[in-house]
Image: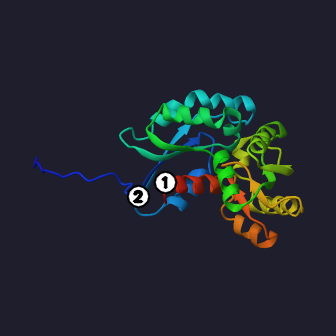
Amino acid sequence: MTHFDYTLEGPIGTRATLGLVVLQTDETIEHDFRTVFGQPGVSLYVTRVPSGADVTTDTLGAMSRALPAAAALLPPELDYDVVGYGCTSGTAVIGQDMIARQVRNGCRTTHVSEPLSALVALCAARGVSRLAFLSPYIESVSQTLRDALKARGVATPVFGSFNEAVETKVAKISKRSLYEAAMALGASDDVEAVFLSCTNLRTFEVIPEIERDLGKPVFSSNQALAWHMGHLAGL
């Protein structure tokens, strides 16, 4: 065997090092984030947290206990600029502060974000305070999130849902279904923008079409979280 000497270089993330905690049942957010953060000098590392096949307040709340172990499975020698937790409804159930603590119990990161904080920050940046809210989930799950938004100054006077609790079906709701529901809800004069809630919805391709035809901003969980993480990382 021939022995070779070698030199070492710094980490891949010369501009930003990002972590993402993804639900075991989520089929969408990783694909979306690769399109956003696939740029030189930005590294994105992903881990998974156990989550229930059906979405209820009980299954969402149970994720809290597993977050430190999930975050600890990110490459341990790295210092992260931002670690995101990819569950909108789970954030409302567990709480933003608890999520931040649990993630930091597993890894070293300057910032922790999740879709709830991200959406509130995005609304503030865009001057929006009244949303048409489209959810895939049953009303009890959605109401928890709407209450959390209201407590942070974002009203959701118009609400609609696909009333689906099974995550594998949520991930396959068609872009046409999203378009039609968003157009119907967003037509109300009582709202300034539309929010498509859930990291498992396939929203990225349909958002521009809805915005064009509706004439109002359209936000989604993955869009807001990616924007907020990029903002916190200085990208």
Left or right: residue 27 compared with residue 176: left
Nearer to the camera, 70 or 119: 119
- The amino acid type, in three-letter code, at marker 2 is Arg
Q: Is residue 153 above or below residue 184?
A: above
Q: Which residue is mark 2?
A: 15
Which residue is farthest left? 2
- Name the residue that disc number 1 marks: 233
Residue at the spot x=29%, y=52% of the render? 10
Are the residues tagged 2 and 1 within 8 Å (C-beta)? yes
Image position, residue 200 (x, y; %): 67, 49
Q: Nearer the viewer, residue 2 or 85?
A: 85
Q: Residues within 10 Å of mark 1 (few under 14, many from 20)?
A: some
Residue 21, quarter of the rendered image: top right
Residue 87, compared with residue 192, is above or below; it is above
Residue 188 quadrant:
bottom right
Disc 1 on helix, strand or loop? loop
In front here: 61 or 175? 61
Q: Is residue 2 above or below residue 235?
A: above
